[in-house]
Amino acid sequence: MNLEQTRRWLAAGRRLGLEVIAPCQLILSNGSKLEATALVKVGPPKGMVVDPAWSVLEPHAHQLVAEGFGYSAVTIGEDDDLSDLLRDWAPG
């Protein structure tokens, strides 16, 4: 993700009243690390991990679910991508 895309995501998150950390690195309890496009905090204590490539998320999918993260693979682009994604996702 380039700087301009990061700015768009941060702006979209602020408009939606969310904290968006982009890019982000998660260190899961099993020690695995996940570098992703964005972490969107929608409720304590966890958030949603977003990355454009399922291959990045797939090795960590079970651990993400176990630790209370939602996740989605999307094409990163305009602000509407973030809005649409959040509309379709609810923390579990």
Image (cartoon, helix red, strand yellow):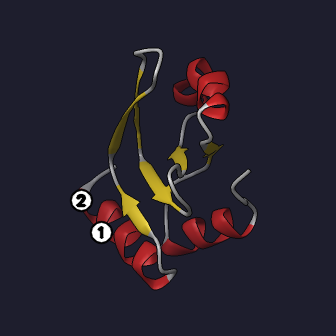
For the residue pair 10 and 19, the one nearer the viewer reads as: 19
In the rendered view, tell whether residue 61 sits above or below residue 23: above
Which residue is at the far front? 44
Q: Element type at marker 2? A: helix
* Residue under the point 52% across and 49% down: 46
Secondary element at image label 1:
helix
**How far apart are the two marked residues, 2 and 1, measured between alpha carbons?**
6 Å
Circle 2 packing at 10 Å, graded few (<14), some (14-19), many (20+), is: few
For badge 2, the amino acid type reads: Leu
Nearer-the-camera pick, 35 or 78: 35
Please report contact status of discs 2 and 1: CB closer than 8 Å, yes or no: yes
**Dot label at residue 63:** none
Q: Position of residue 54 (x, y in %)?
A: 61, 31
Nearer to us in this view, 49 or 52: 49
Q: Residues within 10 Å of mark 1 (few under 14, many from 20)?
A: few
Q: Position of residue 88 (x, y in %)?
A: 76, 63
Residue 63 lies, with reference to residue 26, above or below; the image says above
Give residue 61's quadrant in the image: top right
Q: Amino acid at mark 1?
A: Arg
Q: Residue at x 57, y 29 (%)?
A: 57
Question: Which residue corresponds to mark 1?
Answer: 7
Nearer to us in this view, 83 or 21: 21
Q: Position of residue 3 (x, y in %)?
A: 23, 59
Query: Hey, which residue is sitting farthest bottom in the picture?
Result: 15
Q: Residue at x 53, y 52 (%)?
A: 47
- How many numbered discs sit on the rendered protein? 2
Eyeballing the image, is 40 above or below 28? below
x, y percentage for residue 38? Answer: 43, 51
Q: Which residue is mark 2?
A: 3
Residue at 48% over, 58% down: 40
